[in-house]
Image: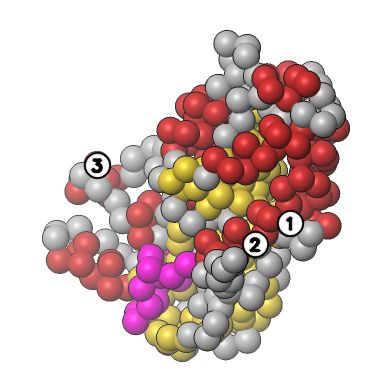
Amino acid sequence: MERKQTAGTVRAICISEKRGTEKHAVPEAKFEKGYGILGDAHAGHWHRQVSLLSYGKVQEFNERGANVQDGAFGENLVVDGLDFRSFPVGTILRCEDVVLKMTQIGKECHTHCQIYQRMGECIMPVQGVFAEVIASGTIHAGSEMTAEFPDGTEPFTAAVITMSDKGSRGERKDESGPAMEEALRGAGFDVVEALILPDEKERLKQELIRLSDQRQVNLILTSGGTGFSSRDTTPEATMEVMTRNAPGIAEALRSESMRYTRRAMLSRGVSVIRNQTLIINLPGSPKAVRESMEIILESVQHGLGILRGSESECAR
C-alpha cells in the first residue's frame, strides 16, 4: 500500500507550566523522545505526550463567537493545513527534526471547561488528537509539518483487558493479562494498553469504545467474565458495542477447547467487530488463555489484515 503524505504549517506552540492552568504561546519548544515538550505540565511517559488541533477548526469555532486564543483548548500545537481529525492513529508527523506518532483521536471531557460553559460545546474532545514523541528536537512557530499515513505494513496494535473484581482491587495477582501480552508480543503485535477492570458492564463498554474509536487498536482481547455468574457480563458488554458480528472465532474457541475440558461448553465468550477493531472474549484462567491464543492467533492475524485492507480474502 502507498504511504501518502500531506503538509501544513505550525501556527502556534503552546505550553502550561502547571496542570489546570491555560496554555500560552511560545516561539519555540524542545520535544523529548518518549516524554513530550520540556516545560509542559502534560508531558510524561504516556501516550498523550503532545496534543494537536487543526487551525481551521479553531477558525470555524471563533466564527461562531467563541473568540478564543491559542492554547485555550489545552492544545500544544495549532497547525494550519492539516485536518488531524481525518487522520488515522499511527500517522507520522514530521516537523524540523521532531517526529511525532499519532496515538489517539479525541478524548473524554470529564469536567466542562469555561469555553463549554460559554458556548455549549468544546472542540478539543472531538477535533483534538494526541501523539507521542519518537524523535527529539526543536519546533519553531511557522515551521512546516508533514503527515505520513500508515501504509498497512505496520505491526498490528492490541490492547488486553482482564475482568476481575479482586484483581482490580489488588487482592489477586493478574496472570491472564500478562499471558495475553506475552503471546501477542511473541507474534509481533504492539501491545499499547493493558487494563484490569472490575466486573462491571458499563465500565467495560466505555473502555472498549475508547480503545476502538479513540486509540483505533486492531485487536482487543478480554479475559474473564464469560461464565454463568451474575457479574459475568463481558459478552453482553461486548455485543452492545459491536458494529458487526464475527462469531466464528468464539465458536472455534469453544470447539477446540472441548479437547482440554468439557466445561468449555459453559463459556459464553463472543467475538465481534467494532468499526476497524476486532474484539475477542477469552476465558479467565491463565492456562485457558494460553490454550486459546494457540487456537486463534494465526487465523486472527489474517483476519486483521483483511480488516485493515493489507491482505485479501482467500479464494478456495
Quadrant placement of the N terminus = bottom right
Sequence order check, earlier mark of 3 and 1? 3
Q: Is residue 30 visible?
A: no
How far across and down, in percent of the image, does residue 40 sit? Answer: 57, 61
Pointers 3 and 1 in contact (CB under 8 A)?
no
Q: Residue at x 19, y 48 (%)?
A: 119
Which range of residues does the magenta coloring cover?
Answer: 73-88
User: Residue type at mark 1?
Assistant: Glu
Instruction: Find numbered disc 3 in the image and state the secondary structure of the residue it sits on.
Output: helix
Circle nearer the viewer, 3 or 1? 1
Taking 39 as reference, is 97 above or below it?
below
According to the picture, the residue beneath numbered tag 1 turns out to be: 298
Label 1: few (<14), some or many (≥20) within 10 Å?
Answer: few
According to the picture, the residue beneath numbered tag 2 turns out to be: 302
Label 2: few (<14), some or many (≥20) within 10 Å?
Answer: some
Give the CA separation, mark 2 to mark 3: 47 Å
Sequence order check, earlier mark of 2 and 3? 3
According to the picture, the residue beneath numbered tag 3 turns out to be: 117
| Left or right of 304 on screen, residue 205 | left
Taking 84 as reference, is 81 above or below it?
below
How far across and down, in percent of the image, does residue 25 sit? Answer: 43, 70
Quadrant placement of the C terminus = bottom right
Q: Residue at x 50, y 26 (%)?
A: 236
Instruction: Find numbered disc 1 in the image and state the secondary structure of the residue it sits on.
Output: helix
